[in-house]
Image (cartoon, coloured by chain):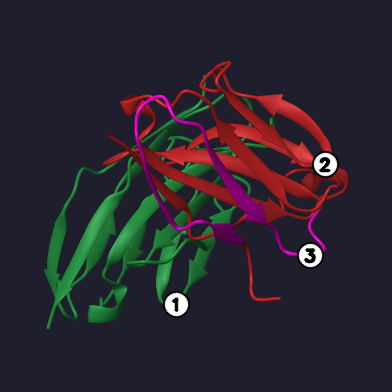
Chain colours: A green, B red
Amino acid sequence: GNSVTQMEGPVTLSEEAFLTINCTYTATGYPSLFWYVQYPGEGLQLLLKATKADDKGSNKGFEATYRKETTSFHLEKGSVQVSDSAVYFCALWSSNYKLTFGKGTLLTVNP
Amino acid sequence: DTGVSQDPRHKITKRGQNVTFRCDPISEHNRLYWYRQTLGQGPEFLTYFQNEAQLEKSRLLSDRFSAERPKGSFSTLEIQRTEQGDSAMYLCASSTAGGGGTVGLNEQFFGPGTRLTVL
């Protein structure tokens, strides 16, 4: 079955530091890949997505590239801000209408 | 319309009681999903509706769980004879239906969730 493995947290960074959160997946076929973010007290929000190999999703300074050869979709940001503090979830969608999520990574950015 | 809403936001109940949660999707969305999120885990799929039809149910959805979407608009999730293991955040999401090669890929918009605590 489908599964997503993402970097264990929590991750604590200083403002303007570089961020990487690793995500790898196992899936049949050709899944689409997503990063969702959950800010404190709020619902999950789609951050970015990629639908095929070598696609790069980007939004709000975050980027992730769909790497089929390594089955990965690592999230990166060059300079994090305090407002980026949240829980980040990697997820995949295959052909059965449901999203399969990783366990989430808590990011805390200190000023 | 400001998004997906869920009610209540928090529910504390005693073991053995029944509870019901409500989800109001974005008005033009014909797909509605329920997920469950336990502490330290990502959301896990429970069930999915297209309009009023329940098209898929996870094996996580035991006989004590039932979901309805009677008029293809709001949905309810009922848990009968609650157990402590049912304590979790219950998330609802909605989306439009895609077409062609992107069927099912349309973004799922999530509500804030209902946090259930079973004592």
Q: What residue type is labelled 2?
A: Pro
- As drawn, the label of residue B27 is 3
**Residue A100 on image: x %, y %:** 51, 36
Tag 2, which secondary structure? loop
**Residue A99 on image: x %, y %:** 56, 40
- Disc 2 chain ID: B
Tag 1, which secondary structure? loop
- Disc 1 chain ID: A
Mark 3 and mark 2: Cα distance apart in space: 15 Å
Q: Which of marks 3 and 2 is in front?
A: 2
The answer to whether the residues at label 3 and label 1 have Cβ atoms under 8 Å apart is: no
Q: For residue B46, which quarter of the picture?
A: top right
Q: What residue type is labelled 3?
A: Ser
Tag 3, which secondary structure? loop
Mark 2 and mark 1: Cα distance apart in space: 39 Å
**Magenta stretch bounds:** B5-29
Q: Please tell me whether residue A24 belongs to the stretch shown in magenta.
A: no
Task: Report the side of B57 relative to A49 (left or right).
Answer: right
Give the class, few, some or many, for how many residues have Cα within 10 Å of label 2's Cα (few <14, many ≥20). few
- Disc 3 chain ID: B
**Residue shown at 35% from the left, 56% from the top:** A88
Q: Which amino acid does label 1 sit on?
A: Lys
- As drawn, the label of residue B70 is 2
The answer to whether the residues at label 2 and label 1 have Cβ atoms under 8 Å apart is: no
- Both labels 3 and 2 in a single chain: yes
- Which residue position holds label 1? A60
The image shows residue A84, relative to residue B27, as above or below, that is: below
